[in-house]
Image (cartoon, grey):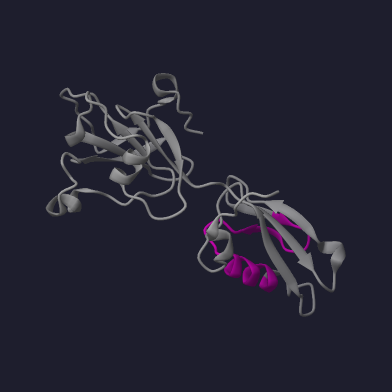
Amino acid sequence: MGETQDPRLHQRDRYHLHTGDTLLLQYRLSPELNQTVTVGPDGYVDLNEAGAVKLEGLTLGEAHDLIVRRDSAHLIDPELNIELKDFQRLYVVVAGQVMNPTRIEMREDMTALQAIMLAGGFRDSAKESKVVLYRRLNSKSDMAEVHVLNLHRIHKTAQLEHDMVLQPGDVLYVPENAATQFGKIMRIPNFSMSSGVPLY
C-alpha cells in the first residue's frame, strides 16, 4: 500500500460519509452478517440485517449507532465494528483563465483564492474581479447557486472578506477579461472540453 492516508480517516467523529464511500461491517458475535457496502447515489446502504439505511452525511460513530439501533430489533446486544475502507475524495474544480486548470483534492479548509493559487494562479487574460463560483443546489442536480467573487488584489488584508471558503464539489471558473453576466442560479457548465478538466 505505502500511501499516506487522508488525515480525515483518523477523525472518526469529524469525517462525514458521502456517496461512493465503502464500509466494512464486522459483527463479533454474528460473523455471518459481516459485509462490505458502498454508500449509493441516494445515500443508502443495503445491510444484511437492518435493510436499507441512509448513512450519507453521518459520521462513522453516528453510522455505527444507527446500524446498531436498527439491528437491535432482530439481534440481542449486537457488537459491531465499522471501518471506512475507501472514501470518495472530496474535491473542487478550478477552470478557465488559470495557469493549470485542474481538480484539487480537499484535505482541509480551502478558500477560492487558495484554490486558484494551487491551480497556478491567474493568467494575464483573467478577469480577477469576476471569478464565478458554482455551488450545486444538491448532490443530484446540475443546477447551482452562482457567486461572483472579486479576487482582484485580494492579497491585501482589508480585501480578505471578498474571499470565500469552498465546499466539496464547488466549481471555480475564472473568465477572460471581458464583460460577462451571470445569473444567481445557473446550470453548471461542462468545462471538460475547454479546459481538459472532467467534472465527474
Residue 42 image position (x, y, % from top left): 58, 48
**Outermost residue, right direction?**
32
Give the residue at the far bottom of this rendering.
77
Residue at 28% over, 44% down:
113
How many circles with numbers are drawn on the protein?
0
Q: Residue furthest top?
A: 193
Residue 90 appears left or right of 177: right
Q: Which residues are magenta?
A: 46-69
The location of residue 72, given as percent across then percent down, is 73, 75
| Residue 100: quarter of image | top left
Q: Position of residue 81 (x, y in %)?
A: 72, 69
Q: On screen, 71 above or below 151?
A: below
The location of residue 28, given as percent across then percent down, is 82, 72
Q: Is residue 134 visible?
A: no
Residue 108 position (above or below residue 69) = above
Residue at position x 65%, y 69% from top?
A: 64
Q: Is residue 57 magenta?
A: yes
**Furthest residue in direction left, as rendered:** 158
29 left or right of 56? right
Q: State whether residue 195 appears in this view.
A: yes
Compared with 125, 24 (above or below) is below
Query: In the image, what residue occupies the spot 36% across and 51% down?
Result: 110
Q: Tell me: 11 left or right of 195.
A: right
Tell whether position 185 is magenta: no
Quadrant assignment, res 104: top left
Vertical relation: 135 (above or below) 72? above
Which residue sits at x=17%, y=36%? Answer: 129
Query: Residue 34, located in which quarter of the rendered image?
Result: bottom right
